Amino acid sequence: MNEDRVPAQYSEMDLSKAKEFDQKVKKNFMPAIRSTVRQIVEDYGPLRGIGVDVGCGTAVFAIELCKHSDLKIYALEKAKPIYEVARMNIEKEGLKERIIPVLGDANKIPFEDEFADFVISRGAYHCWEDKPKVLKEIYRILKKGGIALVGGGFGRYVNDNELERMRKLRDRSLGEAAKVYSSPGAFQEPLEKAGIRDFRLIRERAGLWTEIRK
């Protein structure tokens, strides 16, 4: 097995494995994280108010987004060891006043209706067994006038070599599950089942997203 391979599932990880996972993400996918944050800020900024990162992993993306926005971000993660590493990363970056780690399930997001101005979920979509249910939850917590982005991508600013390298690594890690990030139908049908009408599928060279507005 390639030592840089990032596990597709980490629900059974202990803390040491969660730390290893975090280091692999930082080593292999930071170009995508920086590129995607730059793209989001360029397309939707300035970003202010309350943000929620659904399926935040070790909060690497939330940290980068926080540094380039005025959002206060709630970083939601279901797996306890991953949540603990996220908390450590946030504290290490000196951002615990602006990024709040939350241990919780995307199937029942622990926030009130119309809580967030901006919701992001990058790279967690393949993990959701009941995609319409999670999408309904994201829509529920979104404020009127808010925007949610759900999907997976590497951002428009990655170069071709980095894109190819990261795409291959992702595909090896996720196997068949990676196909959802290149299949518009894998997003459109669950969105329609969730009763969400105001959405736009964004298919780009470096990824597939759905933009949801309320």
Image (cartoon, rainbow, N blue to C red):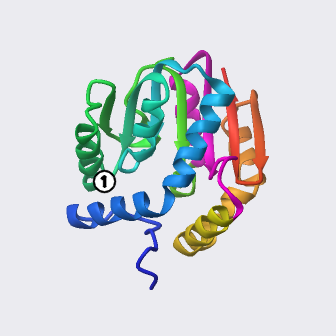
Q: In this rendering, would 167 be left or right of 201?
A: left
Q: How many marks?
A: 1
Asked where in the image residue 202 lies, by quadrant, the reply is top right
Asked where in the image residue 165 lies, by quadrant, the reply is bottom right
Position in image of residue 204 (x %, y %): 77, 49
Name the element at disc 1: helix
Q: In this rendering, would 4 be left or right of 211?
A: left
Task: Kindly identify the residue that appears in the image at 34 percent across and 62 percent down.
Answer: 23
Q: Is residue 125 visible?
A: yes
Task: Kindly identify the residue that appears in the image at 59 percent across and 45 percent down.
Answer: 35
Task: Kindly identify the residue that appears in the image at 78 percent across and 48 percent down.
Answer: 203
- The residue singled out by tag 1 in the image is 82
Q: Amino acid at mark 1?
A: Ile
Check residue 136 for magenta coloring. Answer: yes
Position in image of residue 6 (x %, y %): 45, 68
Q: Residues within 10 Å of mark 1 (few under 14, many from 20)?
A: many
- Quarter of the image that includes the C terminus: top right
Q: In this rendering, would 1 be left or right of 18?
A: right
Residue toward you, 146 or 138: 146
Task: Kindly identify the residue that appears in the image at 42 percent across and 34 percent down.
Answer: 109
Position in image of residue 54 (x %, y %): 46, 40
Q: Is residue 128 visible?
A: no
- Quarter of the image that includes the N terminus: bottom left
What span is colored magenta in the figure? 131-160
Residue toward you, 23 or 87: 23
Position in image of residue 97 (x %, y %): 27, 24
Check residue 84 for magenta coloring. Answer: no
